Amino acid sequence: METERLFLRNWIDDDLDKFANLNADPEVMEFFPNILTRQESDRLAQKIRQNIELNGWGPWAVELKSTGEFIGVVGLQKSDKSLPFSPCVEVAWRLAKPYWGKGYASEAAKACLVYAKTVLKIREVVSFTAVKNVRSQAVMAKIGMHTEGYEFDHPDVPYSSQLCRHILYKIHLN
């Protein structure tokens, strides 16, 4: 899949180092329970790759067309967690900090929504984040998602954590 400035593609082995660096960056991982070790990052990448091979879609590697550089991950994923609104398909993103604020997350996420609608024939896509993560909420709004103010405690985040409380956004695809 491609956009004006990006390729969303299957993962290659060369992506793993940059993905590990992204996952070890405390600023990138600010709204996740913890940064990832290299082993954890590689396991996550392997799981993502397997899901894409199995389903034909998932969180794709994002590459800048102009340089061929891996800048992060954006894509769709089934939520198999015990979330109060499951089952669902989520659009999610994680970009390296040098690529924040340039519109890459929203550009790639919009392409994923088109894919969800036209290829997967999905009628609704969700996204969610910690209530404190206003940057991701801004991306959600920019790509046309809406919230009804529905908040929930994420079951994978300790209740005592300031990141436990999440907010849900949705978009209905016609």
Image (spheres, rainbow, N blue to C red):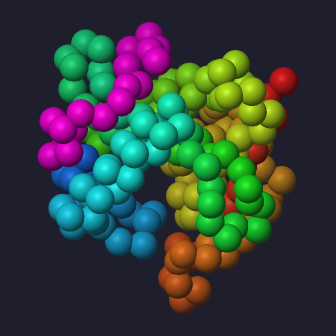
Quarter of the image where one finds residue 16 = top left
Does any portion of residue 131 appear in the rendered image? no
Q: Position of residue 76 (x, y in %)?
A: 56, 40
Q: Tell me what residue is drawn at x 62 percent, y 56 percent.
A: 79
Q: Tell me what residue is drawn at x 51 percent, y 24 percent.
A: 107
Q: Position of residue 114 (x, y in %)?
A: 65, 21
Vertical placement of 58 versus 136: above or below? Answer: above
Q: Is residue 56 left or right of residue 154?
A: left
Q: Give the magenta range.
A: 1-18
Q: Position of residue 144 (x, y in %)?
A: 71, 32
Look at the image and say whether residue 16 sits in the magenta stretch: yes
Q: Is residue 79 left or right of residue 15?
A: right
Quarter of the image where one finds residue 110 = top right
Please tell me which residue lies in front, 119 or 114: 119
Q: Tell me what residue is drawn at x 30 percent, y 34 percent.
A: 11
Look at the image and say whether residue 49 sits in the magenta stretch: no
Q: Is residue 135 left or right of residue 166?
A: left
Quarter of the image where one finds residue 113 = top right
Vertical placement of 172 versus 111: above or below? Answer: below
Vertical placement of 17 versus 31: above or below? Answer: above
